[in-house]
Image: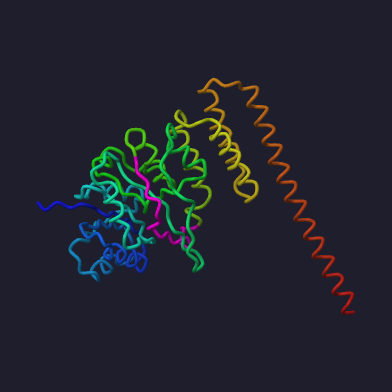
Amino acid sequence: MESITVSVVIPVFNRDWQLRRALASVINQTFQDFEVIVIDDASTIDIKAVIDEFNDERIKLYRNKRNLHAAASRNKGIGYSKGEYIAFLDSDDEWLPEHLRLRINYIKGTDLGGVYGPSLIYKNNVLTATPKARILKDNETMLEYFLGGRLRASTPSLLLKTSVLKKFQFDVNLKQQEDYNLLCKITREHRLGCIEESTTIVHNDEITEYRLSQQWHHRSCIDSIKDFSDIIDFDILYSYVFNRMKSIYWNSEDRSYILEYLKMLNSNINKRGYSIKILNLNIRYGLQILKLYEGLFIYITRIKLSLKRLLHFRLNMQSS
């Protein structure tokens, strides 16, 4: 059997022209030793017709009998893969031509479990870079790296050893952040490399309905933190929780998630044996700050409304 260096896994649901763009970016890679595993997640449109346009035997199509969502579809793709490494690409994103070559050159001959990197974001016809990615510091966990605001190791940037992915797979219970959850699991046992150059384009105008809504965002964040709460620095966790709570207030999101974050934080406090009294004082203080933010926001909104009314009144007076 002929060996393959890279298996590219692309899950797709009801996207045709986006998939065509993604596949074209793979076919145009300067590194050509790959197979492409497309997992059709029970689409109601003809995905096979898009595949047939390329007339390339390296592209293989598998269809789910029912909609399983991205994480489970990627896991199935891992099972079908024959390459030494697996790279992931979302059906609405694309790679620059050097993407695979840079990663293979980086990881070959090392004991790394995989490679990640930053992305370029395409939104409203403008291409912008995400924050710079970097290697983890000594004793820094991947979760701390993510929560510290330096995330940028999204799914389309990943190239991982197939042997690693046979053991660690995507959590099918998560609707978001399943890629970050996967990396947190992998980095407990394997080192990952980082390529600082952005070779992935994420099409943000399709970051699907605000990436499946903020409800799933908060739920996935809370579940992931619970899974790895024993290895995260508490100061980072504490800061992250209050930033999320502040965001919920500012963006008028579901306030019930504030309580969910506090429950998760309190559970972490109990595990660590910290002084509940001191931390409860800090939590109350934090909530007061959030209420102040909310009160200030309402106050500013009322001032703006009053100014609009005053301006409207003056214009009416001038015209009469």
Q: Residue furthest bottom?
A: 320
Residue 243 highlighted magenta (yes or no): no
Residue 201 highlighted magenta (yes or no): yes
Could you tell me which quadrant the C terminus lies in? bottom right
Boundaries of the magenta span: 192-209
> Count of labels shown?
0
- Image coords of residue 269 (percent x, y): 55, 26
Q: Please report the residue visible at 52 percent of the width from the left and 28 percent of the height from the top.
A: 268
Going by the image, does 183 lie left or right of 300?
Answer: left
Q: Residue furthest left?
A: 1
Going by the image, does 259 lie left or right of 128?
Answer: right
In the rendered image, the vertical position of residue 120 relative to residue 268, given as above or below: below
Going by the image, does 314 lie left or right of 20?
Answer: right
Between 278 and 95, the residue placed more toward the observer is 95
Q: Please report the residue visible at 65 percent of the width from the left and 31 percent of the height from the top.
A: 283
Q: How is the image coloured?
A: rainbow
Between 76 and 114, the residue placed more toward the observer is 114
Going by the image, does 94 lie left or right of 266?
Answer: left
- Image coords of residue 93 (percent x, y): 38, 60
- Image coords of residue 10 (percent x, y): 31, 56
Between 260 and 283, the residue placed more toward the observer is 283
- Image coords of residue 156 (percent x, y): 36, 54
